[in-house]
Structure formats: structure tokens, C-alpha cells
Image: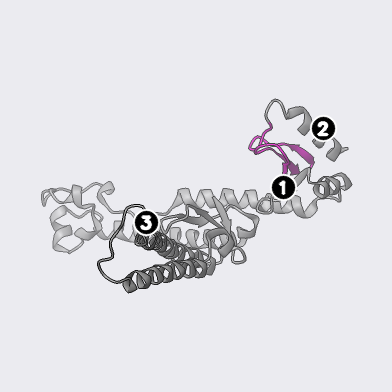
């Protein structure tokens, strides 16, 4: 997964302009070989022991056609992927998460401190949508309250019912409440966004209130640690795979998410002890 921003979009995804330029270069290479081949008089014999002057030209044309098609496909993929990322950036996302290289790549919002304001706005919209959905559900339930299936049909309200269950109901039956279509309140998504915002706000608080630490400055300067800009409470340990120490309001600690291997545990603990000394 790549983190793409407005500043690094071409470096992370690739330049459409470069891909088009390479495609044009291969097309020009094809045309050049084709012109030379066209100017050779027709019917030249291929004599054993003498260089075949057709083969280098046909090989060049085949190679240029193949590479030109590849670069053209790459340009189209990059163009579509750029458009998808640009759509996210226009929505206010600062760090876009991109998985894949083709036009079908997955594009989403990275859980990053830079996207905290976006998540807050999104949560406000989700909560307003939930309020609207609940209101509509109440109004629809009131419209059909006590009505039989036949009365619902006669009133033209069958569109409020779940088709697969309501369709075969006899006219004199009173449909149960669960046959009413419900507008989704997206409660699971709202819960997820609230938890995500709480985590990011906690990170922001820890980062803002962190005291100056000379040992941390030393480790950052010599490359022992590198701070993760998206979630700045994490400091990755150089030379260790997916191993980080976490900054908390009480100091530095091991993190379950990026826990060191048994072989590296003592070395990481020494780093933490120095940071907290």
C-alpha cells in the first residue's frame, strides 16, 4: 500500500506524460524501421551465408510494436489511477491509500494524522445521514401502521415494503414490521470513524505535549529511529523488520502492533530505557 499525496503523486504512481512519451518513442522507432524496410527493392533474395537484412528491421518493428502497446496501456492505467486519486484529494483527503498499479487499484483514505479533519467532517455527515434515515424510517412506519397488504397496495405504498416477502402476501394479511424497507443508519461505519478519530486525537495530544528528549533527537539524527509521519507516535527501529517503539503520555514503550522479534527484544528494550531515562 502506497501513501499518495498531492506532492508525490507522480513519484508514487508514475507520470502519465513519461508513459505517453515512451509510447510515442516506440511508435517512431516502428515507423523508422518500416520506412527502411519499404525502401528495400521488392524480391531481394536471402542468400545462405550472407546477412539477412530483413530480419533486424522486422525484429525492430515487432519489438517497437510490443513495447509501444505496453507503454500505451501503462499510460492509460496511470491516467485513470491519477483521476481516482485526484477525486480523493478534491474531497479533502491529504494522504490517499493506494493498493495496486492498474486502473483497478484500490483507492481509500489512509489512517493518518493528516486526515483527521477529513474524518471529522465525514463523521458529521454520517451522523446527519443517520438522523435523516431514522426520521424517514419512522415516517414510513407511520404511513402503513395497521394497514393490510391490500390497503398498502391500494394506497400505492408497496414500494416501502421488501419485495421478496411482500409480493405474495394475501390482501387481508397485516405485514410484520420487518417487511418494511429500512434506510441504513450506517451505525457500524459511524462507530468505526469515532474510534479512528479517538485514536488519531490521542496521537495528536501525545505528539503536541511531548517533552524535548535529547536521546530521541540523537537516535533520529544517527538513523537508529525514524518517525512515522502518518502516525507520529511510532518510531521504527532501523535494521529491524516492522519493529517500532511507541511514544505515550508516560514515555516510550513497546507496541503490540510492531512488537520486536525475540532476537531483537533486548536491543529494543535498551533503546526504550535510554529514551525514558
Q: Residue at x 22, y 60 (%)?
A: 159
Per the rendering, the mark at residue 197 is none
**Structural distance between the alpha carbons of marks 1 and 3:** 71 Å
Q: Which span of residues is magenta-colored? A: 235-260
Residue 5's image quarter? Answer: bottom right
From this view, report whether residue 241 is shown above or below residue 234.
Answer: above
> What percent of the width, then of the height, locates residue 52?
36, 58
> What percent of the width, then of the height, locates residue 249?
77, 44
- The residue closer to the viewer here, 164 or 42, is 42
Residue 62's image quarter? Answer: bottom left
Q: Residues within 10 Å of mark 1 (few under 14, many from 20)?
A: many
Q: Judge whether residue 252 is colored magenta.
A: yes
Name the front one of labels 1 and 3.
3
**Structural distance between the alpha carbons of marks 3 and 2:** 74 Å
Mark 2 = which residue? Answer: 270
Mark 3 = which residue? Answer: 50
- The residue closer to the viewer here, 239 or 114, is 239
> What percent of the width, then of the height, locates residue 122?
52, 61
- The residue closer to the viewer here, 102 or 19, is 19
SS category of the residue bearing label 1 = loop
- Colouring used for the render: one colour
**Structural distance between the alpha carbons of marks 2 and 1:** 18 Å
Name the front one of labels 3 and 2.
3
SS category of the residue bearing label 2 = helix
Q: Which residue is drawn at 17% across and 64% down?
A: 155
Q: Judge whether residue 143 is colored magenta.
A: no
**163 sits to left or right of 7:** left
Mark 1 = which residue? Answer: 233
Q: How crowded is mark 3: few (under 14 residues within 10 Å), some or many (20 or more)?
A: few
From this view, report whether residue 42 is shown above or below residue 173.
Answer: below
SS category of the residue bearing label 3 = loop
Amino acid at each position: 500500500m502506497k501513501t499518495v499525496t498531492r506532492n508525490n503523486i507522480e513519484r508514487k504512481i508514475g507520470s502519465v506524460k513519461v508513459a505517453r512519451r515512451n509510447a510515442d518513442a516506440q511508435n517512431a522507432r516502428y515507423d523508422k524501421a518500416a520506412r527502411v524496410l519499404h525502401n528495400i527493392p521488392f524480391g531481394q533474395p536471402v542468400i545462405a551465408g550472407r546477412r539477412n537484412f530483413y530480419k533486424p528491421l522486422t525484429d525492430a518493428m515487432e519489438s517497437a510494436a510490443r513495447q509501444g502497446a505496453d507503454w500505451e496501456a501503462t499510460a492509460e492505467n496511470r491516467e485513470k489511477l491519477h483521476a481516482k486519486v485526484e477525486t480523493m484529494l478534491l474531497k479533502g483527503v491529504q494522504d490517499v491509500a493506494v493498493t495496486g498499479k492498474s486502473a483497478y487499484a484500490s483507492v481509500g483514505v489512509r489512517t493518518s494524522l493528516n486526515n483527521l479533519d477529513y474524518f471529522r467532517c465525514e463523521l458529521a455527515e454520517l451522523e446527519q445521514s443517520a438522523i435523516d434515515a431514522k426520521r424517514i424510517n419512522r415516517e414510513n412506519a407511520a404511513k402503513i401502521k395497521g394497514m393490510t397488504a391490500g390497503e398498502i397496495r391500494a394506497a400505492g405504498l408497496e414500494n416501502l415494503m421488501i419485495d421478496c416477502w411482500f409480493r405474495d402476501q394475501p390482501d387481508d394479511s397485516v405485514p410484520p414490521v420487518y417487511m418494511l424497507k429500512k434506510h441504513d443508519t450506517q451505525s457500524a461505519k459511524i462507530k468505526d470513524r469515532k474510534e479512528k478519530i479517538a485514536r488519531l486525537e490521542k496521537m495528536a495530544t501525545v505528539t503536541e505535549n511531548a517533552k524535548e528528549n535529547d536521546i530521541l533527537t540523537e537516535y533520529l539524527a544517527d538513523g537508529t529511529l525514524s518517525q512515522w509521519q502518518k502516525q507520529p507516535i511510532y518510531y521504527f527501529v532501523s535494521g529491524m523488520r516492522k519493529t517500532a517503539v511507541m511514544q505515550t503520555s508516560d514515555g516510550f514503550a513497546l507496541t503490540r502492533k510492531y512488537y520486536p522479534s525475540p532476537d531483537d527484544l533486548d536491543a529494543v528494550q535498551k533503546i526504550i530505557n535510554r529514551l525514558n531515562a
